Image (cartoon, rainbow, N blue to C red):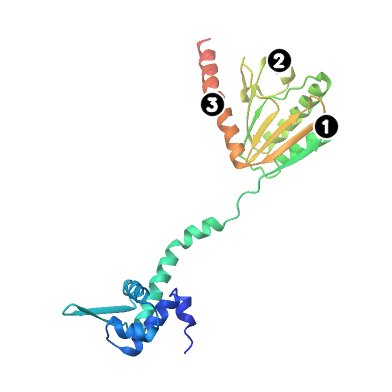
Amino acid sequence: MDTTILEDIGLTHAEIKIYLALNELGSTTAGPILDKSGLQNSVVHMTLHKLVEKGFVSYIIKGKTRYYQAADPRNVLKFIEEKKKRFEAIIPELLIQQQPQEKQEAEIYQGFTGFKNMLYELISDGKSGDEFLFFVFYSKDKVQLEKAHAFYRDYEKERKERGFIIKGIITPDTLPYMKGRDMSTLLLVDFPVPTNISIFHNKVIFTLWEDNMVSYMIHSTQLAESFRQYFYSIWNKYKTEDKNSKKKK
């Protein structure tokens, strides 16, 4: 008889030997089971206990002696069904775990053309109502700074045409470069903030132009959410104060 199915449903080698021995012996004490299975006394008693727990073996007590009996083989189907139900119960969690994890990666763009390509790639999957947050762009190179902000004015028009919600935090030293920008979408603060950072969906971009014109776009939900929370910790506090001061005037 092929007993591999018993292994497949989770029975150990000892459990199979004892279950088959009992199936032949019928109701019996532990002694004949020891002889039939050829297993050690401690193993037999421990295994009988496990088989009783699993429903493969039952027993009755006569006097002070236990008589063991193999369960009806058809009851094994109930054991299999119970395992099936327990497995089905965790399928939703297993499916969630199986979902592909976000691939975190960083893309590098060089030069001014690379900078523009990065910004267009940043919003390539954007839809109307999406939020674009940024900390003001700044560089010590005044020529590149003006060039970048000239591009940003055109870039802002496209973002608005596509229906994005734009919010930015700027500082006084960058105010002269904001001509032509929608000031209602900006918050002017008089303290240092990070510069050259934008957040859109699960992406964050950084531009470092101190020595070389290099820009980075990082795909990371965790990083994007961290910067988004930091942005709003400033925006929610000072934008409200700004509105209140204007009302008083």
C-alpha separation, residue under disc 3 versus residue under disc 2: 22 Å
Give the residue at mark 1. 112
Residue 139 position, x and y percent, is: 77, 22
Q: Residue 233: which numbered mark, if any? A: 3
Residue 56 position, x and y percent, is: 34, 78
Q: Residues within 10 Å of mark 2 (few under 14, many from 20)?
A: few
Q: Which amino acid does the dot numbered 1 rest on?
A: Phe
Tally of numbered discs: 3
124 relative to 186 in the view: left or right:
right
Q: Residue 173: which numbered mark, if any? A: 2
Q: Residues within 10 Å of mark 1 (few under 14, many from 20)?
A: some
Q: Which amino acid does the dot numbered 2 rest on?
A: Asp
Q: Residues within 10 Å of mark 3 (few under 14, many from 20)?
A: few
Residue 221 position, x and y percent, is: 60, 42
Task: Tell me whether the residue at label 1 lies in contact with that at label 3, contact meaning CB atoms closer than 8 angstroms.
Answer: no
C-alpha separation, residue under disc 1 versus residue under disc 3: 31 Å
**Secondary structure found at label 3:** helix
**Sequence-wise first label, 3 or 2:** 2
In the image, residue 163 above or below residue 167:
below
Residue at the top extreme, as displayed: 249
**Secondary structure found at label 2:** helix
In the image, residue 118 above or below residue 62:
above
47 relative to 209 in the view: left or right:
left
